[in-house]
Amino acid sequence: MRHIIRSTAIVFALLISLAFAVSLLSDTGTQPKPLAISELAAKVGDGTIRDITVRGDEISATAGDGAAFTAKKEPAVSLFETLVNAGVPKEKIAAVKVEVKDPSSASVLAASILPIILPFLLVLGMFWYMYRQARQGSMQAFSFGKSRVKLAGMNPDDRKITFRDVAGLHEAKEEVREVVEFLRDPAKFHRLGARIPRGILLVGSPGTGKTLLAKAVANEARVPFFYVSGSEFVEMFVGVGANRVRDTFETAKRAAPAIVFVDEVDAIGRARGAGIGGGHDEREQTLNQILVEMDGFDTNDAVIVMAATNRPDILDPALLRPGRFDRRIILDEPSLNDRIEVLTIHSTGKPIAKNVNLRVVAERTPGFSGADLANLINEAAILAARKGQKSISQDNLLESIEKVMLGPERRSHVLSVKEKEVTAHHEAGHAIVAASLPHSDPVHKVSIISRGRAGGYTLKLPSQDKYLKTKSEFEAELAVLLGGYSAEQLVFNELTTGASNDLKVASDLARRMVTQYGMSDAMGPLSYGETHESIFLGRELMHDRTYSEHIAQQIDAEVRAIIDRAVVTAKRIISDKMDTLKVVAQELITKETLEQEQFYALIGQPAPVQASA
């Protein structure tokens, strides 16, 4: 509808412009004074008029002083007859120079031809517009099944990302660098009988750098790099996705050697057999076509497929076998040294204060992904700009850690005096228990300022990166989680809803200790998992337990026993250190926030030293 309105407006604008041009052509450049025919006759009778020019029914007269006049006579009546009928003597008429001329071509066009032609032009323009729209619709129908694949590096303004811009991921970069070298010099590998890998699957949690690594490969490979999202293959019409897959690989084969990168491949690579009613859905046909293109009868070894996913568990087994995806590269969260590299890269070009120690920031961010660290630097820059600073300080970076982890401060969330007192004792309970257990992580900060959905928080972080956790560490974690609950019960002899999330996290952790980690003496070294026999759209629809109801009761009892032991431990520590708890709570009520040095000074312990990697 908008196209029709716009085209109609254009046609009318052209008509108006044409009419204006015609009026300019018929304009003599002067503006004569219009007269009635009787007034013209009177001036002729007075001898004022010097000459007269007649063009059809239009009369142009010029007086002796040079003044110009116009008049209009009756059609099919001569000027002489008109003046005589008006009572002008014939000798007066004879004294005036009269010249009769044919009407101008512009006037004829405007008066006679244009009223006939313009409607035809308007109708012709409407038909032309309708034909063009119909043609575009037919072309769209033919191009509907075309690939949406794009060629990387087409925009010269984009910043070129290389392997140097990808911090950490050393093993992953080595794997993909080998493929890049294969494309640059295949003869080096062919001499030893090696063939190029057909598929590389990048597997990692969100934010670990899968797409970033693919961008680096695109700039390092020096071969055509085509990229497309997995969701762009699937449409509601059956067969369109398979046709787009064919078109994508045909495009890559014409440019071979080339790389095709499919981001979020789990959108089309989910396990088959998940449909209801036969399983002949569009997604499965698209997956079948990808399987054939990667390793079928007509396979092109010069086209490598890279794909990224954070859900390898739901991918079809046929997609993961060697010959299709020969390599599965795991991208983990960065280690301490990798986090320092990531922070250094993202802080390049930003005004960082000279006293900033990125190692301290990296030590406080275990478990952060590369995207989290990039967001941390950006939040610190925003915070510094908000405060009117000229550079990003260490305090900006440390405050941004909490903002990324927990959310922004909610100082408008004002607590009442009683709620503030309860929250202070609750957080002090967490911190006191954490500082008293040898297997707990050190406390870095205690605050009763609301962040995100938390009314207060106790920030405790490990002294070094950990990839394994012991039963003692889990038991200490449970006691810390229940420290706030125990403090409320012992101090106020009352419970609040503030411990609800702590109880949920503790219950889940205790159940995993029993059912997954084999950390229960009563249940033994068994995994009490669940099998998933029924699948719908790649996800579990029904859960079938592999154990009896009697075992389920034993699991529940063991989970309850683990939680009870954690509560006993937390209450014992808080009872023994009740005076210290009240001192920390009172300091929190006064200052709202305690840093690591302040907290450990209050409880009379030295602040823990951060371990170096």
Image: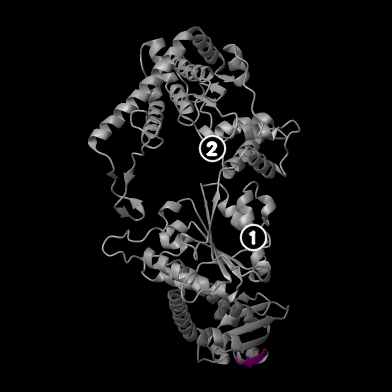
Q: Is residue 241 visible?
A: yes
In the foreground, 193 or 583:
193
Please, which colouring scheme is shown? Answer: one colour
Residue name at image x 42 percent, y 14 percent:
571
**Residue 578 x, y percent position in the rendering:** 47, 8
Mark 1 Cα-neighbour bin, 10 Å: few <14, some 14–19, many ≥20: few
Q: Earlier in the sequence, mark 1 or mark 2?
A: 1
Is residue 52 toward the left or the right of residue 253 in the image? right
What quarter of the picture does the N terminus occupy? bottom left
Mark 2 is surrounded, within 10 Å at the Cα level, by few (under 14), some (14 to 19) or many (20 or more) other residues, namely few
Q: Indicate whether 38 appears above or below 258.
A: below
Drawn side of residue 23 relative to residue 437, left or right: right
Question: Measured from the top left, where is residue 54 in percent x and y?
Answer: 61, 88
Q: Secondary structure at mark 1?
A: helix
Q: Which residues are magenta?
A: 96-102
Q: Quadrant of residue 288?
A: bottom left
Q: Which kind of residue does numbered mark 1 sit on? A: Glu
Q: Is residue 320 above or below residue 299?
A: above
- Does residue 500 lie above or below 490 as drawn? below
Q: Position of residue 68 (x, y in %)?
A: 67, 78
Identity, as a three-letter code, of the amino acid under mark 2: Tyr
**In this orientation, which residue lies closer to the viewer: 542 or 511?**
511
Q: Which mark is residue 467?
A: 2
Q: As displayed, is residue 186 above or below residue 485?
A: below
101 within the magenta span: yes
Residue 8 visible in the current orientation: no
Name the residue furthest right.
354
* Residue wearing tag 1: 178
Q: Are marks 1 and 2 in contact (CB under 8 Å)?
A: no
Q: Say what secondary structure mark 2 lies in.
A: loop
Which residue is rendered at x = 48% and y = 71% of the image?
293
